[in-house]
């Protein structure tokens, strides 16, 4: 196997599987066997590569050639032309959107070139279902160092020196949290991994679990050694079947190798892990609700203090970190805290993984050094806005985050700096919006999600979010009244100050940030009965502006209901009786002629 001339690193993450990587894999195996090359060329199914926008993707090693948007019918040409005759297939390579120039090698593609890969260092590089490949890339070396050459207090001090902060959203210093749990007196302690990723547009944790499950196990064992815990749980939502499958296999392999369970590496330290599958409740991403769920109770937050470091799972001292945080731990212990702290800003060290989605060319998963600007991340790595449209805002921090307008695009990605402009780092969801996005409707969308996911335990969140949603729906339907905007602000402040947990406390953020930066859109909806972005259907006229109409017929071709009447070189006309208000004509028109 190791004597293969070429290794084809084929992305087998959920995104590429949804795009057809399995059918391509089968066709590729068939063609390699047909050409008698199945021993000369090795196909390795990896985890998520990160470049989801162009999946399925494949990296040819050691050449470094990157292929994208692969289909089963491409397999024969690839095998015949590239793998047999040595002529790479240019039509399947990445092409720069601006210059149209072909970029053959992965490291030269801007999406990859500006990243700094630490937490996701094994993405697309190993078969996640083979422990030997993880070990070959220094896997479990950090754990071995922690168990055989360091005291618990030494481990905690190294994590403190690294400056690692919780990547789940709050940004609390990881070493400090471990220190609290280490000092707590108890015969039983727990280490938990939060893989209950529920933000719309977020898929960081899922991708890390699919691509590098052993990194999570290694991080959990080190954390357990630091606080003297004997048992751990990975709380992962059932909607992540591939992540659960690969993590289950990784736990079994680690046990077989003596890297998990009794007397790990002969160190005298014992620790084991099991997976607890959640039902997908967003509120169970909150630590105390997550613990109640593991205990078999309804996932609802409880007041703090006492904090989980003193009384957590089953009232025992508990450390909970999210997937990305734990993925960094093994490398920090192996290379030292100062190594990790050498990247980032004064208060935010290391790297951060983001899931970029929305109105952007390069949808995918990126890992960047702390301190990089939003502009560089969105335009240099993300490739900018498609269809030559203008950037309008970016939602950071998921439904509990805030919308940041264009004037703050040069804000560094840093916990404190992001908070100053009205958003939060969150777990790493980044949703980009173009000029055709209605910010009032966007606030309504996020509030609808939050209201639906509220556990209902505390009145401010249960009733307050419902009332905010009702007002936003009324405004989007053209029924807004004077005073509604002021009520939204008042309700938001009350909910923020009086809700029990982080879900309720941050629930008004999308409303407050859009009111702060896009207040004119609220006024247009309420007082002018107009949606500036032309997205709120009940506020649209669905007529054609004869001055702007270029008589091109694009709206006619896009209309699925036959409501647009048009003849060559004639101005279009919309029959309102046939119009189903689907916005297809508006989306198709390039000249802003649809009112």
Image: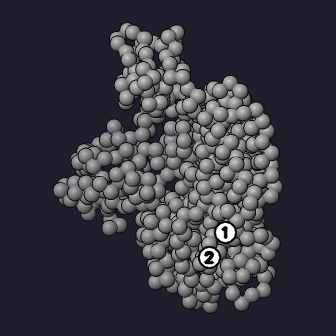
Q: Quadrant of the C terminus?
A: top right
Q: Which mark, by number, is residue 131?
A: none
Q: State which quadrant residue 452 falls in.
A: bottom right
Q: Residues within 10 Å of mark 1 (few under 14, many from 20)?
A: many
Question: SS class of the residue under badge 1?
Answer: loop
In x, y percent, where is residue 585?
45, 25
Question: SS class of the residue under badge 2?
Answer: loop
In x, y percent, where is residue 161?
76, 66
Question: Circle 2 is placed at which residue position?
Answer: 297
Please state which of residues 320 and 33 is positioned toward the viewer in this rendering: 320
Left or right? Give the position of 12 relative to 208. Answer: left
In x, y percent, where is residue 178?
74, 74
Question: Circle 1 is placed at which residue position?
Answer: 300
Q: CA gap, disc 2 to disc 1?
A: 8 Å
Q: Residue at x 53, y 67 (%)?
A: 279
Q: Residue at x 49, y 51 (%)?
A: 50
Q: State which quadrant residue 293 falls in.
A: bottom right
Q: Quadrant of the N terminus?
A: bottom left
Q: Is residue 270 visible?
A: yes
Q: Is residue 338 above or below residue 310?
A: above
Q: State which quadrant residue 222 falls in.
A: bottom right
């Amino acid at each position: 196997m190791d004597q293969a001339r070429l290794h084809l690193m084929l992305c087998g993450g959920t995104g590429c599987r949804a795009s057809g990587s399995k059918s391509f894999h089968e066709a590729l195996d068939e063609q390699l066997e047909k050409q008698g090359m199945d021993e000369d060329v090795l196909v390795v199914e990896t985890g998520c590569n990160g470049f989801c926008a162009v999946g399925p993707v494949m990296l040819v090693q050691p050449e470094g050639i990157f292929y994208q948007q692969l289909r089963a019918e491409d397999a024969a040409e690839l095998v015949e032309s590239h793998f047999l005759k040595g002529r790479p297939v240019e039509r399947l390579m990445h092409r720069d959107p601006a210059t149209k120039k072909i970029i053959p090698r992965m490291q030269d593609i801007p999406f990859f070139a500006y990243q700094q890969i630490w937490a996701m260092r094994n993405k697309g590089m190993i078969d996640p279902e083979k422990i030997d490949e993880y070990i070959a890339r220094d896997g479990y070396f950090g754990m071995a160092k922690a168990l055989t050459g360091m005291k618990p207090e030494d481990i905690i001090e190294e994590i403190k020196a690294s400056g690692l902060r919780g990547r789940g959203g709050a940004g609390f210093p990881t070493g400090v949290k471990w220190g609290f749990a280490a000092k707590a007196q108890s015969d039983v302690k727990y280490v938990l991994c939060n893989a209950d990723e529920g933000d719309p547009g977020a898929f960081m944790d899922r991708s890390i679990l699919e691509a590098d499950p052993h990194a999570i196990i290694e991080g959990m064992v080190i954390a357990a050694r630091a606080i003297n815990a004997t048992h751990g749980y990975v709380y992962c939502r059932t909607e992540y079947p591939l992540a659960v499958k690969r993590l289950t296999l990784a736990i079994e392999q680690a046990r077989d190798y003596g890297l998990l369970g009794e007397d790990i590496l002969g160190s005298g330290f014992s620790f084991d892990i099991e997976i607890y599958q959640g039902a997908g409740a967003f509120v169970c991403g909150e630590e105390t609700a997550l613990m109640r769920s593991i205990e078999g109770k309804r996932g609802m937050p409880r007041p703090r203090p006492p904090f989980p470091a003193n009384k957590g799972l089953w009232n025992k001292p508990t450390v909970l970190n999210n997937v990305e945080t734990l993925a960094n731990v093994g490398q920090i212990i192996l290379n030292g805290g100062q190594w990790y702290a050498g990247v980032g800003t004064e208060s935010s060290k290391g790297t951060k993984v983001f899931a970029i989605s929305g109105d952007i060319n390069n949808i995918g998963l990126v890992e960047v050094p702390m301190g990089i600007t939003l502009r560089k991340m969105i335009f240099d790595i993300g490739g900018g806005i498609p269809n030559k449209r203008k950037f309008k805002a970016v939602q950071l921090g998921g439904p509990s985050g805030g919308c940041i307008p264009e004037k703050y695009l040069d804000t560094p990605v840093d916990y404190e700096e992001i908070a100053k402009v009205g958003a939060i780092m969150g777990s790493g969801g980044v949703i980009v919006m173009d000029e055709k996005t209605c910010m009032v409707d966007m606030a309504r969308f996020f509030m609808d999600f939050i209201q639906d996911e509220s556990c209902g335990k505390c009145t401010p969140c249960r009733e307050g979010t419902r009332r905010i949603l009702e007002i936003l729906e009324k405004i989007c339907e053209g029924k807004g009244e004077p005073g509604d905007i002021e009520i939204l602000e008042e309700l938001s402040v009350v909910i923020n100050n009086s809700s029990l947990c982080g879900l309720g406390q941050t629930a008004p953020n999308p409303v407050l940030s859009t009111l702060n930066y896009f207040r004119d859109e609220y006024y247009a909806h309420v007082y002018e009965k107009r949606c500036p972005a032309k997205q709120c259907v009940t506020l649209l006229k669905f007529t054609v502006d004869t001055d702007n109409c270029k008589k091109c017929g694009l709206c006619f071709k896009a209309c699925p209901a036959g409501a647009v009447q048009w003849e060559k070189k004639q101005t279009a006309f919309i029959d309102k009786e046939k119009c189903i208000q689907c916005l297809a004509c508006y989306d198709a028109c390039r000249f802003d002629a649809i009112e």
